[in-house]
Image (cartoon, rainbow, N blue to C red):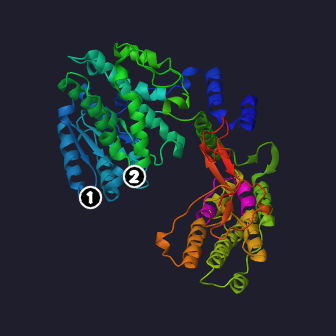
Amino acid sequence: MQRLVITRCFRKDKLAPAIQEFVKHYMGERFIIVPQFDLMDAYKDSTCLTPLIFIISPGSDPMNDLLRFAEQMRMSKKMDKVSLGQGQGRKAEELLTNGRERGQWVLLQNCHLATSWMPTLEAVVESFTPETVRKEFRLWLTSMPSESFPVSVLQISVKMTNEPPMGLRANMTRSYYGLNDEDLDHASKPKEFKKMVFALCLFHAVIQERRKFGSLGFNIAYEFNDSDRNVCLLQLRKFISLYDEVPFDVITFLTCEINYGGRVTDDWDRRCMLGLVKTFINPSVLEDGYAFSPSGLYRTVEPFDRLYYLNLLGSWPLNPEPEVFGLHDNADIACAQSESANILSTILSLFSREESGSSHTSREEMLMRTAQGIQEKLPQLFNVQEFHEKYPTRYEESMNTVLVQEAVRYNRLLRFVQKSLAEFSKAVRGEVVMSAELEAVGSSFFINAVPASWAALAYPSLKPLSSWVDDLVQRVQFIQSWYENGVPKALWMGGFFFPQAFLTGTLQNFARRTQVAIDSVSFRFGLLDEKDLARVESPEEGTIVYGLYLDGARWDAKERTLAESRPKECTWKCHSSI
């Protein structure tokens, strides 16, 4: 445990693997490997009176697993299903009535979309008795987490969740776990078919795992699920039988442009996916030893049965390198840091509220000190009237309006924070009632997080509470310096509450000065070599800003172009740009 603490201090990105090793050493490897989802276990725990609920999440689709299980139990022809929504309540009631009388299975999908019908579902379930329900009857439900779902139904039900597996190895294992030897066999081209199935399953796992890298993986977190992969495998089986040779162009188009591409709305993401799919669908895939990654760890293998593939996947590393996803090594650092932050945030939320670490002082005393410390750091409110007088609205200088609006926005935030701190201090002393909102403020103070009520009125920020307060003070000082000394030669881009207003004001100044329509004006960017901001001069057109960072790349000052990031250098600070 002490080693974990040291790892957290020096290498936060290595905390998750270190926790895995800790659990593996003291509890065993089986506790860090995701078990395969087995509906039979859940079915054995149920009766005709207890519903089975799938708690679904983005990217998960239990429908195929349930249909396969129904076929296994010889109930595929005795299962009725309906997707709940507007006007589907009456049909659902009819299916439930028929199902419990005839001993059939009933599947009600997307219960979270039928909030008004949930009381009826609760009444129907409560009416189940051994005398009125045949023992073969089962009620299957799917729902995302929803406050409208009946608590009584949830309490008596068998609850299951089938989230997308984390990790390339777990994702591939799940794909092959859902297949059998018949699914992997093909009458005319068995070797080609098995190799293409392996490649398509790996492609599916890669694009699902790219989502964990955030904006470095895809600009938008698309909800790819198992149905996309299953459609691709069905099309592969069909088209590989229709052609003498494997139709790579057809499979590429169907996979990238329709099956997965139908979910992709961003042009750059579509271009990225098109580049990725060429690695996994091409004639070289049919050759033994074809490498899907530069290291050669992930490669095509000799076609064999399902058990062989599962044993092979068991030898893959739990934490793959980012090379297989087509990403730079630094992408793994950013992803690991985010994962570690989520783990630590969850641990802190479960931490005892009675004591604070090694200190013997009470929780209330610690919270009071935190509140007082923030109150002492908070600056005074701006005098907006003086801002209006010194920087009146002028046609030829839009920055005056930008400055006044920034002062108004920061005043609103400061006023709310001061009021919240005053009320919280009174509540801790027992002078007023501790409301739910004030309790949430105290809980956030305890784990050094920004209260949600403050963040809702503030600018976007990922900083912890202590750094957030220091940053707020610096931002207010930036606005105060602007008020006292005039428009700075270089403006701090990160100091604006609403940067879009500053960008619009810059365009307005140029458009009004040159007498052109603002709709026809756009930005042109350049980076300055001067690192000392005190020595820069204001440009005749445009403005100089600082406080910008590059993520996933760096600036090569010699070549005057973007370049690959250096190892372990995730972000690059731009000294100044125009």
Q: Quadrant of residue 148?
A: bottom left
Quadrant for the C terminus in the image: bottom right
Q: Would you say 177 lies left or right of 136 here?
A: right
Residue type, mark 1 in image: Gln
Quadrant for the N terminus in the image: top right
Task: Name the main secondary structure of what is drawn in magenta.
Answer: helix
Contact between marks 1 and 2 (CB within 8 A): the answer is no
Front position in the image: 206 or 162:
206
* Residue 497 point in image, percent of width and height: 63, 66
Q: What residue is pinned by disc 1? A: 86
Range drawn in magenta: 453-472
**Residue at x-position 30% and y-position 15%:** 191
Residue that lies at the very extreme toward the bottom in this rendered image: 389
* Residue 178 point in image, percent of width and height: 34, 26
**Residue at x-position 23% and y-position 54%:** 88
- Specify whether residue 57 is in view: no
Residue type, mark 2 in image: Phe
